[in-house]
């Protein structure tokens, strides 16, 4: 088999999809009954979240609002949602809570 430009491109696309998974869906994509589209926005741009059985499986950029979505929106958003380093619950410093117990949360207490 001789390697033509067309075969090289087809193989490259298939390899990229297999390696990265499908995270970007077209605007006219049809989904099953267990999949919902939820509109949202981040500082990377507006999107529709593709949620299947309660899990974010993809991001659908809003092309009419953002003509050139960044890769952070199309690929990075999913990796940030399920990252091990993500803060899952609201946090507060223990020292702040101790200070509030003494009723000096805004810097009125010394020490």
Image (cartoon, helix red, strand yellow):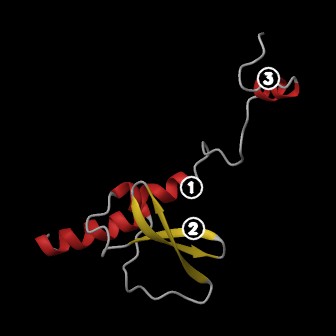
Tell me the distance, in whole angstroms, between the alpha carbons under discs 3 and 1: 36 Å
Q: Are marks 1 and 2 in contact (CB under 8 Å)?
A: yes
Mark in the foreground, 3 or 1: 3
In what quadrant of the picture does the N terminus appear? Answer: bottom left
Apparent side of residue 40 relative to residue 19 in the rendered image (left or right): right
* Disc marking residue 56: 2
Q: In which image quadrant can residue 103 be found? A: top right
Q: Which residue is mark 3?
A: 104
Q: Upstream in the sequence, badge 1 or badge 2?
A: 2
Q: Which residue is mark 1?
A: 81
- The residue at the point 41 percent across, 85 percent down is 29
In what quadrant of the picture does the C terminus appear? Answer: top right
Apparent side of residue 86 relative to residue 62 in the rendered image (left or right): right
**x, y percent for residue 63:** 31, 74
Q: Upstream in the sequence, badge 3 or badge 2?
A: 2
Apparent side of residue 14 relative to residue 110 in the rendered image (left or right): left
Front residue of 12 and 109: 109
Question: In the rendered image, is residue 2 in sight?
Answer: no
**x, y percent for residue 58:** 48, 69
């Amino acid at each position: 088999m001789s390697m033509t430009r067309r075969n090289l491109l087809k193989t490259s696309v298939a390899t990229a999809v297999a390696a990265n998974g499908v995270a970007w869906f077209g605007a006219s994509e049809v989904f099953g009954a267990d999949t919902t589209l939820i509109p949202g926005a981040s500082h990377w741009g507006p999107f529709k979240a593709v949620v299947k059985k309660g899990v974010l499986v993809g991001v659908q950029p809003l092309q009419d609002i953002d003509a050139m979505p960044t890769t952070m929106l199309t690929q990075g958003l999913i990796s940030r949602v399920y990252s091990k380093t993500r803060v899952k619950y609201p946090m507060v410093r223990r020292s702040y809570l101790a200070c509030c117990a003494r009723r000096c949360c805004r810097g009125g207490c010394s020490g």
